Structures are given as structure tokens and as C-alpha cells.
Amino acid sequence: MAKAIFLLVAALAITAVSAGNGRTLLQQKTVTQTAQATPALSTLVAALTKTGLADVLNDPNLVATVFAPTNDAFVALEKSLGYTQEQLLNSAILKPTLLYHVVPKVAAQSSSLTDNQVLATDLPGQSLTVYLKPSGVVISGVQTAANVTQANIVASKAIVHVVDTVLLPAQYALNGAPAPAPAMMGAMAPSAMG
Ligand SMILES: *[C@@H]1O[C@H](CO)[C@@H](O)[C@H](O)[C@H]1NC(C)=O
């Protein structure tokens, strides 16, 4: 019974919280709570929990734009990496990849994004580029591009946009091997290719 009530509360966009003075405040969900309440984001929740980022994104004062890949997006990534979900959740790729989906200090509604806009991410030195296409908003990383499939979910002071593809940072190649540094690519000797 208690669990059923908890699930019901979690399903609401607005949660009542005791203000400690006998009054009740209406408080919006955090990013983590928003993901937890969305069945299509359960792999993301598992990944955030595994990396400790669930706590970071549970801050109600966090101002950020978060691109949230769906379960299908994670399955597609696992396929292209040749990983099981468990392998992905335990891989060194996971945390940098998640950080690459968080744009700090700005909560951007899709209407405030502009074509060719470059977004600095929480992964140091790596950015995403926005493209406004006739089909919708596309967020492009260095290796993959994602369509925004559900925009503008308000999560306390942050904004979540659901995306259909995982954005992979530069240091990981899609075949699962570490990507060569860009400067090395032309200089790579055939023997180094294995
Ligand atoms: C993203 O949208 C484009 C254009 O509609 C489409 O061709 C592409 O397949 C979409 N990506 C995914 C992962 O569904």
C-alpha cells in the first residue's frame, strides 16, 4: 500500500512537500525525479545511479539543460559498441558520456536554442551543436546526433529534453575501442591498426 502511494505521488509532475511550518509547498521534481517518473528513461536512471550523478541531478537548485536519452537510445548504443547493458553500465565510457549530456548554468527551452549554437557541456572541453531542422531540433555531438523527441520538461530549475540517440564523446570510437586523438589520425602507421 505504501509503495502504491509512493508510485502515485512519483507519477505526478508536482509533488507536495512539507515546508516544516505546517504549510505545504508545491515543489517540482528534480531532473533525477523526472527521469525516475518516466518509464522510457529507466536505463538513464540506472546509469545515473551507477555513476553517482543521480545525486548531482537531484539538486532542486541545479540550473542546467539535460538531454535525456531513451531506453531505445541506450539499446542502440550497446549494439554499436557490442556491449550488453551490464557491460555498458560498468564501462569507463558511461560517466563521461552522461556528463556530455548536461549543459551547465543554463536551462534552455527549445524555443531559445538557435541554429548552429554551440553548447558547452559538463564534460570538459567537449561541446554539442544545435541544428534547427524542418524535422525538429537536432543535438549533434562529435560522433552521433540526436533528435529531441520530447522537449521542455521543467525539472525544478533545470530543463530536460528527451533525445532518441546517446551522444558519445570524442574519446570513444563506436567500435568500442578508444578513439585516436584527432592529431594522431593522419600519422597512424599501418602496424598500429593491428
Ligand atoms: C532523427 O530524425 C531524422 C529525421 O526525421 C531521422 O531520419 C532519424 O532516423 C531520426 N533518428 C533516430 C535515431 O530515430
Image (spheres, rainbow, N blue to C red):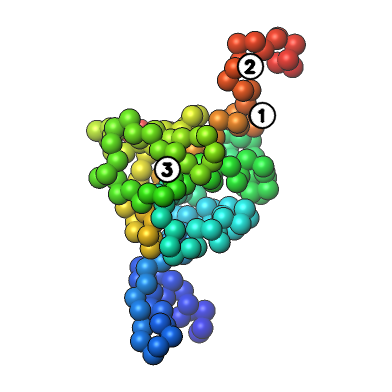
The answer to whether marks 2 and 3 mark residues whose Cβ atoms lie closer than 8 Å is no
Name the quadrant containing residue 34: bottom left
Q: Position of residue 44 (x, y in %)?
A: 52, 53
Q: Position of residue 86 (x, y in %)?
A: 66, 49
Decide: marks 3, 1 in contact (CB < 8 A)? Answer: no
Q: Pick whichever, 102 or 41, lies toward us.
A: 102
Give the distance between the C-alpha atoms of the residues marked 2 and 3, in whole angstroms.
31 Å
Which callout, 3 or 1, points to the residue nearer the camera? Answer: 1
Which quarter holds ligand 1?
Answer: top left
Mark 2: few/some/many CA within 10 Å (<14, 14-19, 20+): few
Q: Is residue 44 left or right of residue 172?
A: left
- Which amino acid does the dot numbered 2 rest on? Met
Say which residue appears at 61% left-offset and 57% top-offset.
Answer: 52
**Quadrant (top left, top right, bottom left, bottom right) of the C terminus:** top right
Q: Is residue 102 above or below residue 174?
A: below
Judged left or right of residue 161, residue 80 is right
Label drawn at residue 85: none
Crowding near the residue tagged with mark 1, few <14, some 14–19, many ≥20 C-alpha atoms within 10 Å:
few
Secondary structure at numbered mark 3: loop
Residue depicted at x 33% and y 48%: 108
Give how far across and how far down residue 4 sits, in percent.
48, 79
Q: Is the CB of mark 3 within 8 Å of ligand 1? A: yes
> Reading the chain from its start, which is encountered first: label 2 or label 1?
1
Tag on residue 164?
Answer: 3
Rendered image: mark on residue 184: 2
Q: Quadrant of residue 22?
A: bottom left
From this view, report whether residue 1 is shown above or below residue 102. Answer: below
Q: Foreground mark, 2 or 1?
A: 2
For label 1, the residue is 177
